[in-house]
Amino acid sequence: MAFPDRIERTVEIAHPPAKVWAALTTAEGLSAWFGNQADIDLRPGGAASMKWDGGHTADMRVERVEEPTVFGFTWHIYGLPDDDPRRTYVEFTLEPAGAGTRLTVVESGFAQLADDAYSKAYGGNSEGWASELGELVSYLDAAA
Amino acid sequence: MPQPDTEAIAEQVFIALADPSRRSILAALASGGPATATDLADRLPITRQAIAKHLALLAEAGLVTAEPGERRRVRYRVRSAPMQVAQQFLAALARDWDGTLDALKGHLDQQLTEPTRTGESQ
């Protein structure tokens, strides 16, 4: 059985979609329940970010904005190096359910593999801090 | 499809990490950088013979790489690529949407009981 590429959750919330939408898509809302600080430029391609008191940050890119039903963004896969291009896609879907909202969140893309990751994982090229430091030395030598 | 290979790479990482001796060897290489079997034997409570055996196994699995050093001393370094593949699997397990959605519900319930908190006028 493969590890999950996709996570899906559905919850019933006793508040109307407009309230839930505001909590998901405004800096004030996001900073109240998700991050400790938040910024968001709510348009496809817009940047958003969250910061936590522990020092962790998340940089997001807004992908879908269909008020008040679909909000999607991509973000970095936690634990991979900052320059790794792989990102997961998170999509919230809001449906009216009685006086409240049925909220579904799907996060997908955990199992994606960059084109070169397979050869990197099995191949013989060495990488890591030693090569990063080697590049720094070359850069400083060239600049001298 | 690369999928089964990804699984195989991650499995090698998890097998390696399941053994306390190999875990401490990888931890020592990660924190202190490339080292020989002798260097590691000086730093860890493991015999040099056992370290050499584990390093051979880790090299076979592609988790460390051997590089020739001065005076024919072979130094081993961690290969980060397989670790990143394993990390991706862990990322799905570590993402806490249950807790996050609970926090969202809690936030909205609190807003309802404190309607003036958001500055909305009725």
Image (spheres, rainbow, N blue to C red):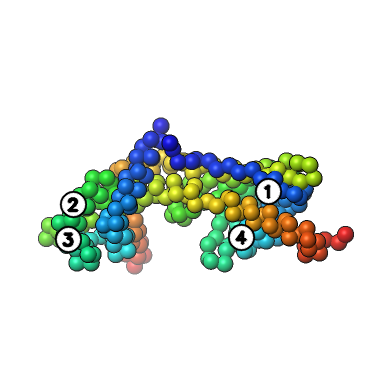
C-alpha gap between disc 1 and disc 3: 60 Å
Asked if residue A73 is positioned above or below residue B108 in the image, the reply reads above
C-alpha gap between disc 1 and disc 4: 20 Å
Asked whether A101 or B27 is in front, the reply is: A101
* Location of the N terminus of chain B (image quadrant): top left
Mark 4 highlights which residue? A35
Q: Position of residue A127 (x, y in %)?
A: 32, 53
* Location of the C terminus of chain B (image quadrant): bottom right
SS label for mark 3: loop
Residue density around tag 4, few if under 14, some if 14–19, many if 20 or more, within 10 Å: many
Q: Amino acid at mark 4?
A: Gly
Q: Nearer the viewer, mark 1 or mark 3?
A: 3
Which residue is drawn at the image coordinates 34% and 40% (left, top)? B8
SS label for mark 4: loop
Mark 1 highlights which residue? A43
Give residue B53's mark: 2
Asked whether B76 or A6 is in front, the reply is: A6
Q: If you read the primary sequence from the N terminus, does the residue marked by circle 3 or circle 2 appear first?
A: 3
Q: Are marks 1 and 3 on the same chain?
A: no
Which residue is drawn at the image coordinates 29% and 64% (left, top)? B32
Whether residue A135 is visible: no
Mark 3 highlights which residue? B47
Q: Amino acid at mark 1?
A: Arg
Query: Dot 4 falls on which chain?
Result: A
Q: Position of residue A80 (x, y in %)?
A: 44, 52
Residue density around tag 3, few if under 14, some if 14–19, many if 20 or more, within 10 Å: some
C-alpha gap between disc 3 and disc 2: 10 Å
**Residue with the most extreme top position:** B1
Give residue B9's mark: none
SS label for mark 2: helix
Q: Are marks 1 and 2 on the same chain?
A: no
Which residue is drawn at the image coordinates 34% and 56% (left, top)? A128
